[in-house]
Amino acid sequence: MIETPNTARAWATELAACLGVGAVLGVIGPFGSFFNDALVVRVAYWAGVCLVCGLAFGVAFRLLAPRARRAGIPVWAWVPAMTLATAVPLAGVTRLMAAVPWPAIRQAVGLMDWYGQTVVVSLVYVAFYIVLRGRTSQQAIAPLPPADGGPEGPRILRRLPPRLGQDLLCLSMEDHYVRLHTTQGSALVLMSLGQALEEVRGLEGLKVHRSWWVARRAVEGVVEDGRNLRLLLTGGLTAPVSRASVARLRAAGWLGDPAGGDPDPEAAGA
C-alpha cells in the first residue's frame, strides 16, 4: 500500500530529499559524469535530474496510486509499467539538460543507452519511494483500539478520522488492512475484513465481493462488463461484484429488479 498525500508538506519533503540525493550523486559522479566537469557543475546537474525525477514520479504516483487502489490492482502489477513509461519523457528531458554543460554527450551516449541509464535511476527512486511511503502509511494507520458498541451507532464509524466525517460508503480489503471510504476520502485501518463486517452491523449494506462491503445508499448504478458486474458508487468509486453475490444483490433489489427488499442484517455482516 502506498499513501500519496497531495499536500505542500509532502511535496516539499520529497523534493528536498531529491535535492539531497542529487548533491550526493554529484559528488560520486555516476555513469562517467565524475570526469565530465567540476564538482559544482556535477552537483547542479544531478540535483536538477533528481528534482525532475521527483516531480515526474510524484505526479505519476498521485495520479495512478488512488485509481489502482480503488480498482484493487496490486502495486507489483502497475508500478513497473509506470516506471518504464515515465522514464521515456524523463530520458528526453535529462538528455537536454546534460547537453547544456556537455554538448558532446549526444554523440558519446546513444538514445537507448541513455534511456537505460534513466530506467536505472528511476527504479532506484521508485523503490525508495515505495519503501518510505509504505512505512509512513503503516505509521499513520496503526490499529485503533476496538470500539465499543452503544447508542452512538455502528462501531466502525468510530474508527473514522474526524476529517472524513461519518458518511461511510464502502469497505475494501487491502492486504492486512481495511480501507474505509467516505464522501470525504478514505483511511486505512489495521483490522480484518471479518472484524470490519462485525462493526458495520446497523448500517444497511451488503458484502458484494470477497474483499468489498458496500452501503446501500452509496449505490448509484450498475455497470455490466461482459459477465462481470461493478457497482457505481457515490464519489466515482466502483466496487466489483462477485458472481456468488449476484443472486443476493438481485433479490435485495440492488440490480434494478422489481423483486427487491432490504438486505437482512445477517447478510449485511456476511
Image (spheres, rainbow, N blue to C red):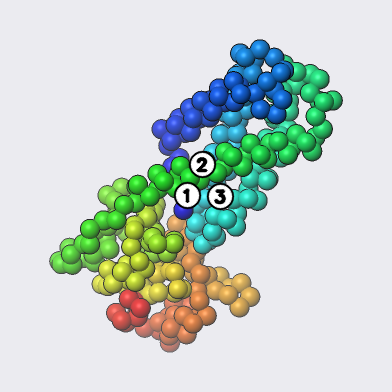
Q: Nearer the viewer, residue 128 or 83?
A: 128
Evaluate if marks 1 and 2 touch, with contact meaning CB atoms under 8 Å apart.
yes
- For disc 2, the marked residue is 129
Label 3: how many residues lie within 10 Å, few (<14), some (14-19) or many (20+)?
some
The extreme bottom residue here reads 259
Three-letter residue code for mark 3: Leu
- Residue 2: mark in rendering: 1
Q: Nearer the viewer, mark 3 or mark 1?
A: 1
User: Mark 2 and mark 3: span between their CA atoms?
Assistant: 14 Å
Three-letter residue code for mark 1: Ile
State the SS at label 3: helix
Is 197 left or right of 58, judged from the image as shown? left
Image coords of residue 173 (percent x, y): 42, 64
The answer to whether residue 107 of the structure is visible from this angle is: yes
- Compared with 213, 8 (above or below) is above
Between discs 3 and 1, the one toward the N terminus: 1
At 51% from the left and 41% from the top, the residue drawn is 129
- For disc 3, the marked residue is 64
- Compared with 2, 150 (above or below) is below
- Where on the picture, by quarter, is residue 9? top left
At 18% from the left and 67% from the top, the residue drawn is 149
Between discs 1 and 2, the one toward the N terminus: 1
Evaluate if marks 3 and 1 touch, with contact meaning CB atoms under 8 Å apart.
no
The extreme right residue here reads 107
User: Mark 3 and mark 1: span between their CA atoms?
Assistant: 11 Å
